[in-house]
Amino acid sequence: MKMNTPHIVQYQGSKRILAPQILHYLPLHFERLIEPFAGMAAITVAVAQQKRAFRYVVNDINQPLIVLLTEAIQTPEQLIAKYKSLWNGQFDYPGGSVEHYYHVRQLFNEGEQTAENMLYLLARCVKGSVRYGRNGKFNQSPDKRRNGTRPETLADNVRRISSMLKNKVEFATKDYRDILETARKGDIVYMDPPYQGVSNVRDCRYVSGIDFSDFVQAVDGLNHKEIDFIISYDGKCGGKTYGEELPDYLECQKIYLNAGLSSQSTLLGKKETTYETLYLSKNLQQKEILRPTQMCLFENQAIV
């Protein structure tokens, strides 16, 4: 029977849905998984559920996310209790649940960037989407159609994730290049950097963007050290390609993963499938891994 992979909260950009496809290209067993752009660490959770790695490095420059993940994994009951109290507070708050959300957001932006505040904002905001203004303040609006993830549902998922990862994770909030410097043979690095098109600029979806040439140089460094990696970086939808391809000299294998129907195209009355790109390092291609049984698009040909 297939087991659902737990997740703490909905998070826009998470690779949770694509995780089963991504894991097809990972070895069945390896020493350590490193996520330099972890977000809510969907790939780490998926790998841990299948017990493929012994240790994990979870890094994100957005410190409140790491504070949240650390507490969820290391002290889950503490986070569950605080979230439950905060979630219940919206129903007695003067002005209602929407005003309660804005109150918590204000506290967060004034410095109370606790695990429970971050979690509540993610659970209540529109599309589970992190948004920051140019002043660095969290500015996403509340989803007025719902009250956020129920504490009972969240508690079950947090406990499951904690049971898989407690005392196995090194948490960090460093520049991704510093994290890559710590990688060694036997590790697998999974990278899901900010969407292309926001490199070199401040974008409301991210605490900071990354420079394309800097990123390519960092990836090249992994090749020179013979470190295995997988990168989610660009894609296509409805005949349009998004993002600049990684250069050929990195010797990556490029694979398109089916990410399902585009919600934006659906709103416009179109039925278009989104494909997200996966790049496999040259060393990883030579390893014995669990290849997918379904057909995947690899450039202009199908692979099995």
Image: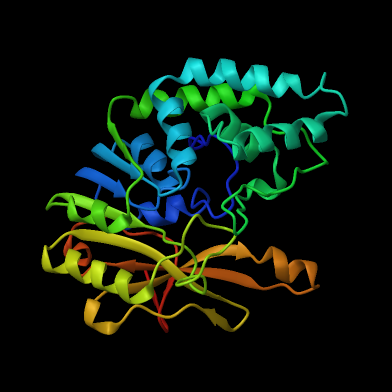
Q: Quadrant of residue 75?
A: top left
User: In front here: 299 or 102?
Assistant: 102
Q: Quadrant of residue 59?
A: top left
Tell me: 239 left or right of 101. Answer: left
Residue 239 seen from this side? yes
- Name the residue: 48% across, 33% down: 68
- Name the residue: 31% across, 61% down: 230
- Name the residue: 52% across, 74% down: 197
Tell me: 273 left or right of 285. Answer: right
* Vertical side of 142 occupied by 235: above or below: below
* Vertical side of 174 occupied by 299: above or below: below
Residue 257 is situated, as x and y percent measured from the top left of the image, at 47, 66
- Name the residue: 47% across, 59% down: 208
* Vertical side of 123 occupied by 222: above or below: below
Residue 225 is situated, as x and y percent measured from the top left of the image, at 11, 63
Colour pattern of the rendering: rainbow
